[in-house]
Amino acid sequence: MALTIVIILCFLSASLVSSIVTLQNPSFELPPANLNTNSASQFVLLNSDINTIPGWSYQGTVWYVTAGKNVSLPGDGHGLQLGPNGVISQTFSYDGSDDYVLTFTIAPSSPDCAKQAIAVSVSGPSVSKVFSYQASLGKETWQTYAYALWRNELIPTSVLTVQIESVTARSTGNSACWPIVDDLLLSGINYPKVSVGNFILNGGFEVGPSFPQSSSQGILLEAESNIDPSSPVQSALQYWIVVGTVRYIDSKHYTVAEGLKAVELVSGNPSGIAYNTVFLQSGQVTLEFYMGDAGDSCVGVFTVVAQVGTRKWNFTTRSKGDGSSNKYSLSFNAPTSPTEVVSISFASYDETRNSNNVLCGPVIDGILGTYSNGSPSTRLQNSLVIFCLGLVFTFLFLA
């Protein structure tokens, strides 16, 4: 039995896929029970003794919101406004995924409130993070974020809970400016397959948060402060660490150089992504990547700083905002120590805005890492095979 488990684990470590976890009533289009249908207000205050929200538990002050004159929501549908001590939560069944990523939308309750500091705290099994609405990051008065809800592997459980709560405004502005939550999507994430010919796992950013049907502005990803260095999930973008704020974009709404997904460095000061790796042997390494614009009228001079360890390269291009891109490359010698962790990063330190006065910047895509004397990923696969065979023989010997 133990030998069978080892073989299964070795197979899974080389071949895993992702899945969509079904949340109940993720966009709140199923209205609360016993709702006052005669109310003409866009905001209906819920009473926990009378109104239940299908699929959700809640406490504190919560309003059921309908999009309209002063409120813009994805799909012009419904959402929940979380007032003082407002909390919503949903429990879902663990489906065997390695980790989970939540995509969600937050919106202000009016254009005036878009200028205030509205925020929510999102919590998973073992982590939490505060997300704030920032008007400079989108042309719509709502924004979509994603967050990795790391599963606590030390506490086995068959169910997991996601929770979102309001955060008290840090400004002295309108006390009625509480956040609206809408359009949630939960993805079960399994680690990407070993990529033959490329030691950068998820170098094309194809494995990441799922895009809601109504998503047209991309998904904002923010730097994490409580990263587990032993986990392949370092952010909502698997295997990558986010620096500052970046926008995860898809080919449906933006121009990407390769595949279906890419990353736009939008915030400056800086905005970037980083990847930690260990080189299995010394030798010359070549990194290739695409740099361009998202076709979102982002015009200007882009400079991306690529860094490997302590060594830096500057790459500059002039963007016309028309979705063009170019391939760039750099070479370096891999360190001789197989235990040395090397950081590879791409960052922008400049602030650029498009014709809608929205922060934008260079798009990075298709990162390819190779040795000059062969594919490191092949050696990684061979190492995996040797490791698995070693475990098999160990179990046979002990048996």
Image: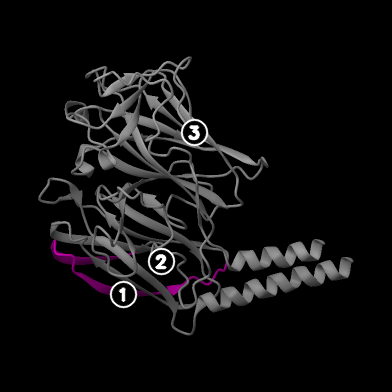
The percent coordinates of residue 250 (x first, y second) are: 31, 59
**Residue located at (31% from left, 22% from top):** 169
- Mark 3 or 1: in front is 3
Element type at marker 1? Answer: strand
- Mark 1 or 2: in front is 2
Q: Main secondary structure of the magenta part?
A: strand
Kind of residue indicated by mark 2:
Gly
Label 1 with label 2: CB-CB less than 8 Å: no
Q: Which mark is residue 55?
A: 3
> Does residue 321 belong to the magenta stretch?
yes
**Residue located at (57% from left, 77% from top):** 379
Element type at marker 2? Answer: loop
Name the quadrant of the N terminus: bottom right
Label 2 with label 3: CB-CB less than 8 Å: no
**Residue located at (25% from left, 30% from top):** 108
Near mark 1 (Cα within 10 A), the count class, few <14, some 14-19 or many ≥20, is some
Q: Is residue 344 above or below residue 73?
A: below
The percent coordinates of residue 39 (x first, y second) are: 28, 18
The percent coordinates of residue 163 (x first, y second) are: 48, 32
On screen, residue 345 versus residue 328, left or right, reads right
Q: Which mark is residue 203?
A: 2
> Does residue 248 belong to the magenta stretch?
no
Q: Is residue 184 above or below residue 6?
A: above
- Which of the marked residues, 2 or 3, is nearer the chain's N terminus? 3
Name the quadrant of the C terminus: bottom right
The Cα–Cα distance between marks 1 and 2, rounded to whole angstroms, is 14 Å
The percent coordinates of residue 312 (x first, y second) are: 32, 64
Q: What is the span of residues highlighted in magenta in the rendered image?
A: 311-338
Label 1: which residue? 329
Kind of residue indicated by mark 1:
Ser
The Cα–Cα distance between marks 3 and 1, rounded to whole angstroms, is 49 Å
Of residues 249 and 283, which is closer to you in this image?
Answer: 249
